[in-house]
Amino acid sequence: MIEAHHRDGGPAFELYALGLEHKHVPEIQLYGGLSRRPIFMPSVGHYHQGMLVSVPLYLDDLPGRPTGADLREALRVFYDGSEHVKVMAGNGKGTLEPEALNGTNRLELYVWENEARRHAVLVARLDSLGKGASGAAVQNLRLMLDLGPGA
């Protein structure tokens, strides 16, 4: 899809999988411990690499009804010591640029929240070519073998 998007000179940005049946939703629900199926809306932009993945969350549906700060801290603790995965504080602008990590094997995780509405959005920023499927496979293997997140 991405190759066709670039070859055909597609729009600058578009959402896809709007039937809300993306193939990764079951694993997000399972490994996120979610009792309610998450809304996952991936996107593609008119650039060759770089990616933002966002998952909206209802804070009241998560186990223990955490705050956004609780989610950020849980992620920070889980990835503490990881060379390539960093949990980030907000950037003060409320926006993210998808190509900022191009050429790296880094992944940044953000949690933006609206505590009054009990909503949050988890956002991962990565280089879609540098930290693609093979890198994810190695990280998942490390987790399955209980070696920690590693990269």
Image (cartoon, grey):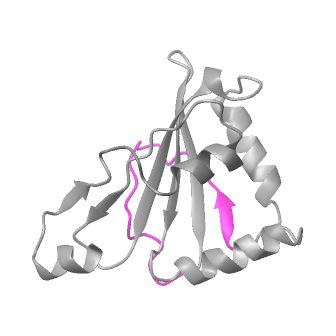
Q: Residue at x 38, y 48 (%)?
A: 41
Q: Is residue 28 above or below residue 131?
A: above
Task: Give left or right: position of 86 versus 18.
Answer: right
- In the picture, the quarter occupied by the C terminus is bottom right
**Which quadrant of the view contains residue 148?**
bottom right
Task: Give left or right: position of 89 versus 33.
Answer: left
Residue 1: horizontal and vertical position, in percent? 27, 72
Residue 73 can be seen in this image: yes
Task: Give left or right: position of 77 versus 24.
Answer: right
Task: Give left or right: position of 74 versus 125.
Answer: right
Q: Is residue 118 above or below residue 122?
A: above
Q: Is residue 4 above or below residue 95?
A: below
Residue 50: horizontal and vertical position, in percent? 40, 71
Q: Is residue 69 magenta?
A: no
Residue 65: horizontal and vertical position, in percent? 71, 22
The magenta segment is: 83-104
- By secondary structure, the bulk of the magenta-drawn segment is best described as loop
In depth, the one of 146 and 11 nearer the eye is: 146
